[in-house]
Image (cartoon, rainbow, N blue to C red):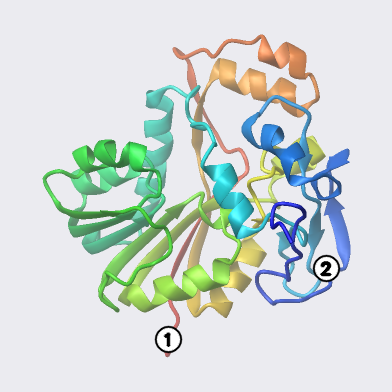
Amino acid sequence: MNSFANFPERNCPICLNKTPAALKVSSKIRAENLDFASLTEPWRGFFKEKIFFSYYRCMNCRILFCPTYFSSEQLEALYSQMPDNTAEMPMAAIQKTQYSYFKTLRRYSPLTGALLEIGPDIGIFTEACAKEGAFETFWLYEPNKAVHQALADRVKDKEYHIKTEMFNYDDIDNHSVSTVVMIHVLDHLLEPQKVLREIKEKMANGGILAIVTHNENSLLPSFTRSRWPAYCLQHPQLFSPKSIRNLLTTCGFKTIGIHDTVNYFPAGYLLKHGLWATGMNKLGNEIPNTTNLIMPLKLGNMITIATLSEGK
């Protein structure tokens, strides 16, 4: 059978429950009712008809996830053609947002030893760690080869290793990493448990794990409902403080802090996305980004800080 012909079924990514009990949210046109070819354009476009796989609530561990979703092979094909999702965001706003994550990390991590960052992109967060931290080694796992040079330039005065793969950490010694960072990665993983367990083996005793995700239990999705931007084809699951704690506990971590994050946006960008979230797509498309006014807002994201559980 052609693996692109239909979509596989998934168990709950935390407790492996096979039967999600409650439909939480779906798009008017449900992705699971279409074929793969029909979803390539919605995957690329942001201001088009909103289509995503239906999200169900696991009644055991409370995570929100898509029991029907793309296969690994389908995802590889889609991500290979995905445009830069920060192209319309001015660098000043990106830097402010990433630096706010760094300020939270430094409250928990001594910023020494080895840093493992998964999905660093062009390395804005990485640069803050290099400039203001005292990390001796940087392990940077970024599949997009096009950004490797920009990433290398930001850590050129440090010992660094840039890897194209995302999930094979065999090159790193076990129990050697002091800090692990995943910024908007966990929402995208088909098997978050598997990745977290691999990461755990690489972490030193007392090491810190920092994870930035969307927060499906925040105020914004209650207003925007199915038009919340995080409900999209790229997210096989979405977390709340409760569900991410459950996942981390299952994988041998202890959660020591969960904080709402501050994100920075141009005023025009916010207006455009606000119109889109309320269904006024055509009007939203006509709004230009305003780069001279950047606003800090808490818009439904969170940063979770964890360490290894005792005896794990």
Q: Which residue is mark 2?
A: 20
| Residue appearing at x 25%, y 75% in the figure | 173
Distance between the Cα atoms at labels 2 and 1?
A: 31 Å
Q: Position of residue 292 (x, y in %)?
A: 44, 12
Circle 2 crowding by C-alpha within 10 Å: few under 14, some 14–19, many from 20: many
Q: Amino acid at mark 2?
A: Pro
Tell me the SS state at disc 2: loop
Of the residues shown, which amino acid type is indicated by label 1? Glu
Q: Quadrant of the C terminus?
A: bottom left
Residue at the spot of label 1: 310
Residue 214 visible within the image: no
Q: Is residue 2 above or below residue 97?
A: below
Query: Residue, x 81% and y 51% (percent of image)?
Result: 54
User: Where residue 159 sits: x, y (%)?
Assistant: 14, 55
Please name whichever residue, 136 or 191, is drawn nearer the observer in this view of the structure.
Answer: 191
Image quarter of residue 72: bottom right
Q: Quadrant of the N terminus?
A: bottom right
- With 290 as the anchor, is 279 left or right in this view? right
172 relative position to 33: left or right = left
Count residues near mark 1 (Cα–Cα under 10 Å), then give few for <14, some for 14-19, many for 20+.
few
Q: Is residue 15 visible?
A: yes
Front-most of 63 and 1?
1
Q: Is residue 79 left or right of residue 201?
A: right
Residue 215 on image: x %, y %? 64, 51
Residue at the farthest front position: 1
Image quadrant where residue 181 sits: bottom left
Q: Residue furthest left?
A: 157
Q: Earlier in the sequence, mark 2 or mark 1?
A: 2
